[in-house]
Amino acid sequence: MAEFVYPPVIAAARAMFKALDLRFDIDGTEHVPRRGGAVLVSNHISYLDFVFAGFAARPAKRLVRFMAKDSVFRHRLSGPLMRAMKHIPVDRAEGEAAFAHALRALRAGEIVGVFPEATISESFTLGKFKTGATRMAQQAGVPMLPVALWGTQRLWTKGRKRDLRRNHVPITIRVGAPITPDPAEPALRVTRRLRERVQELLEAAQRAYPAKPKCAEDAWWLPAHLGGTAPPPATAR
């Protein structure tokens, strides 16, 4: 089926990347399958993470259908775009419809994007994973693609004003090898293994990240265990 909206949106995003002079370091894109369904699973530290996680699939010429809270689809500006790009609305009070929608997309050969923490991590550490991504992959018979993002929180995150100046922010993206879950294995056990893999990728992205805080005030985007001033996980939650 022809895509009339998604490609122009990607072109606009790439123009924004160029205008902001973002410095990308992306590794592991060869793991993204060029055909067939998959669940892309990413950490969540920024309002723009769906843009960057989706960008990781571009070398494979794939479009990612992200699961997002339904309020985004009700917005007069973002709603029409989200629907036209075939993203999947999630009503957190009644998630069964979204789960069924995602399964149909996976079985039709789509990549579905999921943030299993279900909210932005204000500590910039990895939170607890919900089991939905695993259960989708098990029922659809598709692999899960672990992804870690770092640096995106410096552009726009919860509790801070967005900063879209031309300030050369580095963005580091790591894509891991696919994990194909056994349908017979408990979803909770698979989810723990998935979270461990995303954690490994996140730590690799943090080690590779070329920027350091310029001063104590600028250390807000680093988690406490790395010497930053972001709230520790217990406080953030």
Image (cartoon, helix red, strand yellow):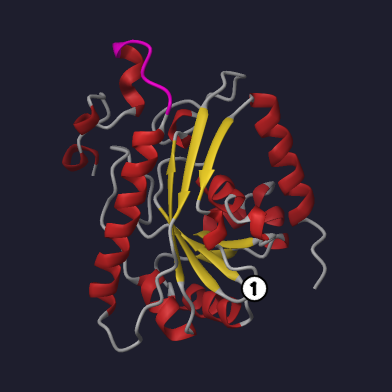
Vertical placement of residue 161 versus 28, above or below? above
**Front in this rendered view, residue 25 or 3:** 25
The residue type indicated by label 1 comes to Arg
Question: Which residue is the site of mark 1?
Answer: 35
In x, y percent, where is residue 229? 25, 24
**Left or right: 231 in relation to 115:** left
What residue is drawn where x is 48% and y is 44%? 173
Range of residues picked out in magenta? 210-216
Vertical placement of residue 57 versus 10, above or below? below
**Front in this rendered view, residue 113 or 36:** 36
Q: In which quarter of the image is the C terminus?
A: top left
214 in the magenta segment: yes
Examine the image and state in which quarter residue 168 appears: top right
In x, y percent, where is residue 93? 39, 68
Q: Is the magenta stretch mostly helix, strand or loop?
A: loop
**Left or right: 180 in relation to 34:** left
72 in the magenta segment: no
Q: In which quarter of the image is the N terminus?
A: bottom right
Answer whether residue 140 is visible to the viewer in this image: yes
In this view, the residue farthest toward the left is: 234
What residue is drawn where x is 27% and y is 51%? 127
**Front in this rendered view, residue 172 or 111:** 172
Answer whether residue 129 is visible to the viewer in this image: no
**Front in this rendered view, residue 28 or 100:** 28
What residue is drawn where x is 35% and y is 87%? 183
